[in-house]
Amino acid sequence: MASGDTTQAGTLSRRDFLKLMGAAGTALTFAPFVPWGKFMPNPDTAKLEKVKVILPDGNQANVNTFPVNHAEVVTYPSSGDRVLDEEAFRKWQFIRLPDELGGSANDVSAFRVYSMVCLHLWCLWKYWPQEGRKRGECPCHGSQYNPLTGTAFAGPASLQAEPSNTLPNLDLEADADGNLWILPAKFTPNDNGVVGYGRFIK
Ligand code: FES
């Protein structure tokens, strides 16, 4: 896409952008060749740095204390502005996998962080730890996400072509004390993915 197009998208107000996207509807599904990552309202990657995984109680998540088969909402990247931080595009499900999927490991392999914006029509999904579920579920039209991979396996999001069937994710690191950190994200479909659009599985 020409740089002029990028500039134009940059001046679009968020409200206009969301109206535009609403009108576009399922066009996302049928136009995987469009470089959506260039103008989707994702955080500015240029300023991102390694940050703590801060839980809703204000504490940093730790490998030694976060429960197996459990999820919390985390904000990334946090702007420090309470209103901005409420944006759906900054909300992620921080999940410790169930035991049978490796959640008891004492390192970052036990964890996943996925964008909460459902890849179908942008409702917010969440992880359900109950027996017989243990998956991400979207309340709007029933899309279900595999907690191990972030790929939709049921519902309308599962019918979308890649990368729009797999949630964006964040990479983690644990320090010597077990404290968890989010590594700087790169919001392109081939890296951490594009929030609201998807991610190619490598
Ligand atoms: S918005 Fe999630 S299934 Fe439709």
Image (cartoon, grey):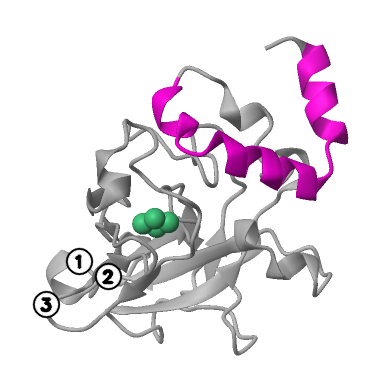
> Could you tell whether 67 is left or right of 6 in the image?
left
Q: Which mark is residue 97?
A: 2
The residue that disc 1 covers is 102
List the single residue furthest toward the right. 11
Please say if 62 is above or below 167.
below
Which one is closest to the eye, mark 2 or mark 1?
A: 2
**Mark 1 neighbour density, 10 Å: few (under 14) some (14–19) many (20 or more):** some
Residue 150, given in percent of the width and then of the height, sits at: 32, 52
The residue that disc 3 covers is 132
Is the residue under label 3 in contact with that under label 1 (CB below 8 Å)?
no
- Mark 3 near ligand 1 (CB under 8 Å)? no
Secondary structure at badge 3 equals loop
Q: Give the range drawn in magenta.
A: 3-32
Is the residue under label 1 in contact with that under label 2 (CB below 8 Å)?
yes
Residue 175, given in percent of the width and then of the height, sits at: 51, 66
Q: What residue type is labelled 1?
A: Gly
C-alpha separation, residue under disc 1 versus residue under disc 3: 17 Å
